[in-house]
Image: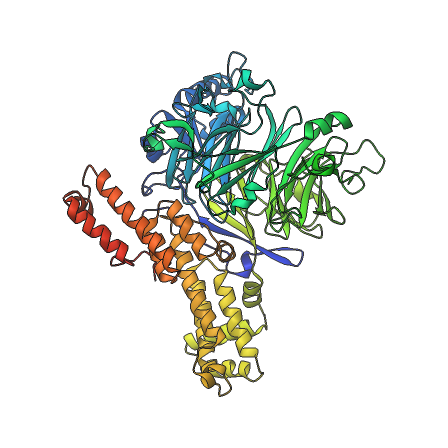
Amino acid sequence: DSGDTSFEPSGATESTWQDLGDLPYRRVRMYSDIIWGRKGKQAKSPKSSISKASTFSDSAEENPDEEQFGLSWYPKSYVGIVRAHQNAVLGTGEDSFELSRLLSTTTTTFVAGCPNGGPIAAVTAPLSTGGGSGGGGIGNVSTSGFGSRTTIRIMNNSGKLMAAIPFPPKDFSLFTGTQQIQIHRSPGDIIAIGFTSRCVLVVVLRDSLVLSYDLLGKRVLPPFFALIDRNGERNLGKGMDLLEARIFEGGVAVLGVDMSSAVVEFLDEHDDPSYADEADVTSRRIVPLMPSQSDQSPSDGKEGKLSASASPFFLAPPPHYAIITPLPTAMYSRSNHIAFRCIAILPRQYAPSCRPELFLSTSDGSVVVSELHPSTSPNGGLTDIDCRSKIGDTGGIGPIAPIVSMSFAPNGRFLACFTSNSILTVVSTTFESKVLEFNTSSGSSSPPRSMGWCGEDSVVLHWKNLGVLMVGPYGDWLRFSYGNDSAVIGHGGGEDGLKRKNPSNETEVYLVPEIDCCRIVTPTSVEILQRVPPGTADLLRIGSIEPGALLLDASDAFDSGSPNADEAARSITQQEGLLEEAIQGCITAAAGEFDVKVQKRMLRAASYGLHFSCKDENSPCRNTGRPSAEAVTFVKTARKLRVLNAIHRPSIGWAMTASQFDSVSPKGVVARLMASGKPSLASSVSEYLKLGRKVRDYARAMKAAAFVGSCSTLSCANDTMSRRLISMTDSQIAEEAIKIIKGAEIGKGDIPR
């Protein structure tokens, strides 16, 4: 990986932390000098940045008709039009930063991250769908020259390309019963992209058409409308125009311009079939179509033909399917003379009904909650929370300000609401208590471009040219700049820190909220903004007297050859239970770190403490002959860290934390590696972690299938291994595949020591 994007995590010292009230936070740079969309290893070139090297050769080889600026790709013809305008009107034709700014004013780049440190998806589209009117332009520049095609790219966090999906797809068809309808869409029709927790990329178009792909760019379900046009069968190829689409961990929720809404749940064969059977009677199912021929690579622009017959559902659930539940919000809107402004979706694991619940903000400053059983629930499952006194209240001066953006906390307990008068309010999900109210009007009077949670303790908001604002539970705040210097330029002190500073140094920023942190994606880097784990804070704070900190100091003294090391360690053993607490503290802190050197330092301290623990006559491991609980935890943590370090490598590019690893579970990590096209590493991880036999057998089978597939697709030999594979006969390939299935080829350096 020497030629890949650099992986140099930081943030392991207290001097780099920022205090949000009494909570320490840190920025961990996971990957830097990223060239997004590269196919192979990154060439050794000057550090990429929007102002220095805005066009990258690796991506140009992939598509010579496009020009790249960070995470945005534009047709070269369109870049030429904008450059000519820039030169004629502004006289700055050689200024690449100014060129990228002009391009961003006429287009938008959608960027989404797969949950739990997964891949990044990006697509650039014009602000309007062209034609003669050209809207969304500046001066004489319009989006009419953008073209009729774009590309959706799926990349890992180090920028390596995993899949390139042409949009619109060739042979773009909609199947309704036995009817196949050709449909035509343009890049300007895209209004949202995002990932579900099952690693399905969802693309939503302006007319509620939903597309779904896996991490390798293969279609998961046929295209379908979330909201069907009310004209019925006369407009089978047309859906309802959308006001908003919100993709969440279980699917997507949409709000139409006529105030109608629907929730689409993406399910798979691992879900309980009874969950689909108990859906509302008005819901409809979307299942895969029976392929008439094997799917071809999406990078070739070919999807493979599909027949119009749906896969049978009554025998067994298909690998993937969707349930669409329409909600009677349009009727509610008309009868109460209100309009809906924005939506948020509460995942089913946190909802009292055990199904997703849709929250809709109203034009009169309230919130309406809709359950997914409108046919059997009173009032169509719609309930007005009447939170006007808690959110958007102007104190009697002017009308109540409606909510324009909402976001649920990862634990589902709190809801962040941003109102039209620039007030951020955090309330409990039941709206019974108000946790926070924060005024952002001194920095900007417009809503943030994106809002989400950084773990469960703070809310992050991003405005263009204003950086990222983090607000804590007691009104404390931090402000981070993501310009060329990437320096923190404000912290909780006074309102002056919220004012705009050095806007010319700002760069494009995209937020990816996670369960324990927030990923920050920029044109050249990926970093994690997170609360410093309590175990790490206890160990690394200057002057800490926690047992783990004392043991760490003793271990460092021992490594340096200090004669006081033994005395320092024995002082911890004087009090019963203190040594075990210190060992556990070092192990826990090591799990929360990304830097391998810091991990080893903390694990050495834990090992040093275990040495004294085993010598203790009262130690359980000495009396029973079995390893202590601390020793067992030490081994499990060391194994987990080795796996995490393996998937952090730029060639894999998963920015997963230890908490996310525990949330997904080791089996989930193996499944995600196989979905990412890494069956060899998935097989090694399953063997190394000693997972169940079925998991290991399946991982080996996938590795064998990948080996056979690679042998059949190799056409030229660039190295010794490729030449050997090309020269193999079918019988030799079969023998090698059998060896892999039996486990004879497992573990050849996939997991670094």
Whether residue 556 is visible, yes or no, is: no
Is residue 45 something one can see in this rendering?
A: yes
Most extreme residue toward the top is 132
Q: Tell me where residue 446 sits by quadrant.
A: top right
Q: Where is residue 94 shown, x and y percent of the image?
A: 43, 26
On the picture, is 155 further left or further right than 583? left
Q: Work out whether residue 652 or residue 372 is closer to the camera in this orientation and state it.
A: 372
Residue 136 image-quadrant placement: top right
Total marks shown come to 0
Left or right of 556: which side holds 747? left
Answer above or below: position of 473 versus 188: below
Residue at the image point whose x is 43% and y is 71% from the top: 604
Asked where in the image residue 168 lies, by quadrant, the reply is top left
Q: Quick one: which residue is furthest to the front in this view?
A: 315
User: Residue 388 location in percent, x, y?
Assistant: 79, 38
Q: Which of the two residues, 693 or 63, is positioned nearer the viewer here? A: 693
Q: In this view, does 180 lie above or below 693?
A: above
Identify the residue at the far bottom of this view: 617
Display colour scheme: rainbow
Residue appearing at x 41%, y 78% in the figure: 561
Image quarter of the C terminus? bottom left
636 on left or right of 285: left
User: Which residue is painted at 35% across and 52% down in the image?
Assistant: 698
696 or 684, nearer to the observer: 696
Residue 392 image position (x, y, % from top left):
76, 38
Q: Where is residue 50 in the image (x, y as percent from the top left)?
A: 45, 35
